């Protein structure tokens, strides 16, 4: 079963290290979608794939790295979009 989720992550997440952490984990797990830094400092992460893989990736995003401080994560289900890869996009 396929699933899509959008996460809005608040905390010390604007670093290149956190971005690379998310991208490399998404590629390793086989997640598709994107991440982008929002103007208000939050990180938006859209993830889709098999149910268990999306849940696994969402937990990784919520946990972060040892150098990030996640203060808040808003999670909302989304319609499956059929992304072909995972990438970091600029707005």
Image (cartoon, rainbow, N blue to C red):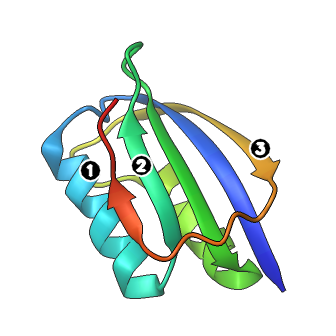
Residue 48, picture quadrant = bottom right
Quarter of the figure that contains the N terminus: bottom right
Report, in whole angstroms, how far the alpha carbon at label 1 lies from the one at label 2: 8 Å
Q: Secondary structure at mark 3?
A: strand
Taking the spot 65% from the left edge, 47% from the top edge, the residue there is 6
Q: Secondary structure at mark 1?
A: helix
Taking the spot 35% from the left edge, 61% from the top edge, the residue there is 87
10 relative position to 79: left or right: left
Q: Which residue is mark 3?
A: 76
Mark nearer the viewer, 2 or 3: 2
Q: Secondary structure at mark 2?
A: strand
Report, in whole angstroms, how far the alpha carbon at label 2 lies from the one at label 3: 15 Å
Q: Which residue is mark 1?
A: 19
Taking the spot 76% from the left edge, 65% from the top edge, the residue there is 80
43 relative position to 83: left or right: left
Q: Is residue 45 visible?
A: yes
What x and y, as percent, mark residue 17? 16, 50
Q: Residues within 10 Å of mark 3 (few under 14, many from 20)?
A: few
Up-down: is 84 above or below 73?
below
**Residue farthest toward the top in the current orientation of the protein:** 40
Residue 36, picture quadrant = top left
Q: Which residue is mark 2?
A: 35
What x and y, as percent, mark residue 21? 27, 61
Looking at marks 1 and 2 on the same chain, the residue that comes earlier in the sequence is marked by 1
């Amino acid at each position: 079963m396929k699933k899509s989720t959008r996460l809005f992550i608040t905390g010390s997440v604007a670093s290149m290290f956190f971005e690379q952490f998310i991208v490399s984990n998404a590629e390793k797990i086989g997640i598709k979608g994107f991440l982008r830094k929002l103007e208000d400092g939050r990180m938006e992460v859209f993830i889709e794939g098999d149910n268990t893989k999306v849940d696994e990736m969402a937990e990784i995003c919520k946990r972060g790295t040892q150098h990030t401080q996640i203060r808040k994560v808003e999670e909302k289900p989304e319609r499956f979009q059929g992304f072909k890869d995972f990438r970091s996009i600029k707005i």
